Image (spheres, grey):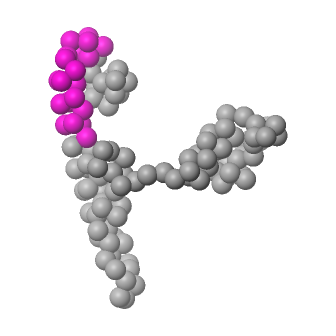
Amino acid sequence: MWSVARFQLGLSDEEFFDITPLQFEYLTKRYEQERDTLDFRAGIVASTVANCNRGKGQKAFKPKDFMPDYGGADSKATKGPNQMKMMAMTLNALYGGTFDGKPNNPKKVGHGRTSNR
């Protein structure tokens, strides 16, 4: 909560510790509304460009097609077991971990980044 207050909401430590949990919830909801509005505006621009360049007979793009899904309560985005395993392996590789006793290679995980060490 503190990091959200400091970095997303821009509250000082004093301001954060002076507000109630309900006030924090309202501020967070307002931040999310503003973020969604800005994402929608960017989606309008992206869908307009994509629609100007789409092929004949191709389905028109909508702004939502270019908006991130933040995984809220009404989100339909869920990660399956394979996606979660791939994410865990990628993070493991990035932090120099091992898999089955062998060094984990990010290229095999699909991350594409390798170290020059």
Residue shown at the point (32%, 45%) measured from the top left? 72
Residue 55 magenta? no
The quarter of the displayed image where residue 21 is located:
top left
Q: Is residue 35 visible?
A: yes
Secondary structure mostly seen in magenta is helix
Classify the position of the N terminus by image quarter: top left
Relative to 70, does residue 12 appear above or below in the rendering?
above
The span shown in magenta is 13-32
Q: Residue furthest right?
A: 102
Residue shown at the point (35%, 20%) measured from the top left? 2
Nearest the viewer among 60 and 81 is: 81
Residue shown at the point (21%, 12%) measured from the top left? 18
Query: Is residue 22 left or right of 94 when viewed as pictured?
Result: left
Residue shown at the point (72%, 34%) measured from the top left? 97
Q: Position of residue 60 (x, y in %)?
A: 31, 77
Query: Is residue 25 left or right of 73 when viewed as pictured?
Result: left
